[in-house]
Image (tube, helix red, strand yellow):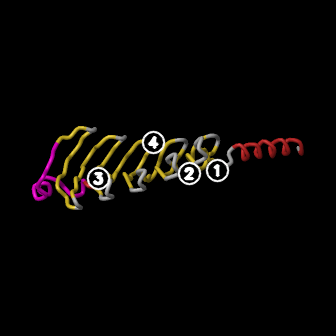
């Protein structure tokens, strides 16, 4: 009986050790950090950061079983935000925000499985100038007048 318990205990310990969360770092040949984050059983899991070869942050977000998930941020080499949004099962989903090189949001879009699917709103100097509607990546309608957009659409479609 003692021997069976000991074997079971050793087996359970080996499972625990093999599934441990480890912090991983990878570097460019110039010595700058390339990426860092958490690994479980050889797969990216948890929060990760990626860097340009000059050490500036390029993107950051969560992984689950090697696939991007939850909310991510992407940056340009000048450190300004390029875009941000949700991932689900490794695909861009829900609302994504896109920024100009000057750091102003220039459009935001609903995405599903990495494609525009729903509404996109275009801005110029923080002012809404156009609304578009997409289905599976193809534009199906466009409005340049906010009044006509509101008349034709149910605002609950925006959520």
For label 1, the crowd category at 10 Å Cα-Cα, with few meaning under 14, some 14 to 19 and many 20 or more, is some
Query: Which x, y percent locates residue 129?
Result: 17, 55
Residue at screen point 36% across, 41% down: 114
Question: Disc 2 on helix, strand or loop?
Answer: strand
Question: Which residue is the extreme one toward the front?
Answer: 30
Depth-wise, is mark 4 or mark 1 nearer the camera? 1
Mark 3 → mark 2, Cα distance in angstroms: 26 Å
List the residue tagged with mark 1: 23
Disc 4 to disc 3, C-alpha distance: 20 Å
Query: Quick one: label 4 or label 3, which is nearer the N terminus?
Result: 4
Please give left or right for residue 54 compared with residue 136 in the image. right
Which tag, 4 or 2, sits closer to the chain's start? 2
**Distance (Cα) linking label 1 and label 2:** 10 Å
- Gap in Å between the C-alphas at discs 4 and 1? 21 Å
- Tag 4, which secondary structure? loop
Camera-near label (4 vs 3) is 3
Q: Which residue is mark 3?
A: 108
Residue 157 position within the rendered picture, expressed as x and y whole percent measured from the top left:
24, 53
Question: In the image, which residues are magenta?
Answer: 141-157
Q: Answer with mark 4 or mark 1, whichever residue precedes in sequence.
A: 1
Q: Are marks 3 and 1 in contact (CB under 8 Å)?
A: no
Residue placed under numbered mark 4 in the picture: 90
Q: Nearer the viewer, mark 3 or mark 2?
A: 3
Mark 3 and mark 1: Cα distance apart in space: 34 Å
Using residue 130 as the reference point, say whether residue 74 is left or right of it. Answer: right
Above or below, comparing residue 125 to residue 20 in the picture: below
> Which of 89/75 is in front?
75
Q: Earlier in the sequence, mark 3 or mark 1?
A: 1
Which residue position is annotated with label 2? 46
């Amino acid at each position: 009986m003692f021997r069976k318990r000991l074997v079971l205990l050793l087996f359970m310990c080996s499972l625990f050790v093999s599934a441990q969360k480890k912090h991983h770092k990878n570097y460019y040949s110039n010595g700058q950090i390339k990426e860092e984050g958490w690994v479980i059983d050889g797969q990216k899991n948890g929060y990760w950061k990626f860097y340009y070869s000059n050490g500036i942050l390029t993107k950051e977000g969560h992984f689950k079983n090697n696939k991007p998930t939850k909310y991510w941020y992407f940056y340009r080499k000048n450190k300004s935000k390029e875009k941000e949004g949700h991932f689900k099962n490794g695909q861009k989903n829900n609302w994504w925000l896109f920024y100009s090189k000057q750091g102003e949001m220039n459009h935001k879009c609903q995405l599903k499985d990495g494609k525009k699917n729903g509404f996109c709103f275009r801005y110029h100097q923080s002012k809404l100038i156009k609304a578009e509607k997409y289905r599976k990546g193809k534009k199906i309608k466009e409005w340049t007048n906010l009044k006509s957009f509101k008349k034709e659409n149910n605002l609950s479609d925006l959520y």
